[in-house]
Amino acid sequence: MKPRIAIPVPNSKAPIYVLRSLPQYEHAVKEAGGEPVIIDVNAPSNAIAQKVKTCDGVLLPGSPADVDPEKYGAKKHAKTASADPLRDNADELLLQDAYNMHKPVFGICYGLQSLNVWRTGTLVQHLEKAVDHDPGRKIANAHEVELAPDSKLAQILRTAGAIKGGEPARLAVNSSHHQSAGELGDGLRLAAWSPEDGVKEAIEGTADNHFVLCVQWHPERTYDGDAASRALFNAFVRAAGEWHKKLAAKQQDFESVGE
């Protein structure tokens, strides 16, 4: 059985964006060996909560929306986009289930920001730095990120042969965002940053027994042609598969005791 990966519809009010972006996440999950399970963010909360219970991992995709600054106690910046309360609600329900059950979590762009705020972190509402972090889809390698050498992210990429063992380990990535993580939330640590301006580019969970990884770039867009992008999805889906096996083993042990 393939691990089931919950993916909330990226945005509740931007159908063109959804039609363009959602298939890329589905494709990457399928190629990595998983089964995408699309979560309708317009559905009632109880329906979303029930559906995610059948899944083995949670993927939080990008979105043209911005997280409501009120969630982290800030005034709205003039360049902050409108929030998407339905997407936020779905993310919170999925994250609650994932953290309660220790299901793997993989966040991408908005997904990173959503998770960081949910974990009581903050956001930088608009980046006005030396590096252009929002050149869009036309530039495949917008800038480099430097990886924390002892991070799970670096370990995943080294194991897959996507980066070499030298220090500092760097990776060329695409980029399409105008916000980033500010103060990191509870149980999160910095995994990668832009060496030119220090913008936080990846964060990960600190618990050894819970796969939580978020990147600010878009590996779903480059899955077919980029070893690092494939490594991230492969590691996430593999972790979801391992979670499912552990759950099945626990259920079998419980049933054996009851016989």
Image (cartoon, grey):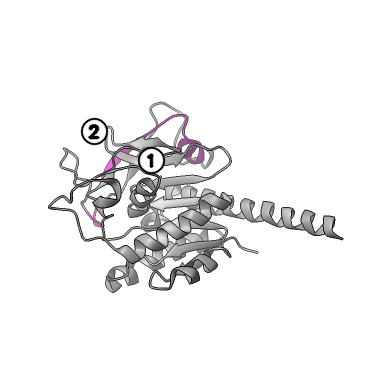
Q: Which mark is residue 208?
A: none
Going by the numbered disc 1, the residue's amino acid type is Gly
Q: Kindly report the distance in space between the C-alpha atoms of the residues bearing marks 1 and 2.
A: 23 Å
- Nearer to us: label 1 or label 2: 1
Going by the numbered disc 2, the residue's amino acid type is Glu
Total count of labels: 2
Q: Residue at x 36, y 38 (%)?
A: 184
Residue 153 seen in render:
yes
Name the outermost residue toward the top. 167
Mark nearer the N terminus (1 vs 2):
1
Q: Residues within 10 Å of mark 1 (few under 14, many from 20)?
A: some
Residue corresponding to mark 1: 185
Q: Quadrant of residue 34?
A: bottom right
Horizontally, residue 29 falls left or right of residue 202, namely: right
- Is 66 magenta? The answer is no
Residue 103 seen in render:
no
> Which stretch did the figure color magenta?
136-158
Element type at marker 2? loop
Q: Residues within 10 Å of mark 2 (few under 14, many from 20)?
A: few
Q: Position of residue 211 (x, y in %)?
A: 53, 45
Q: Nearer the viewer, residue 152 or 135?
A: 152
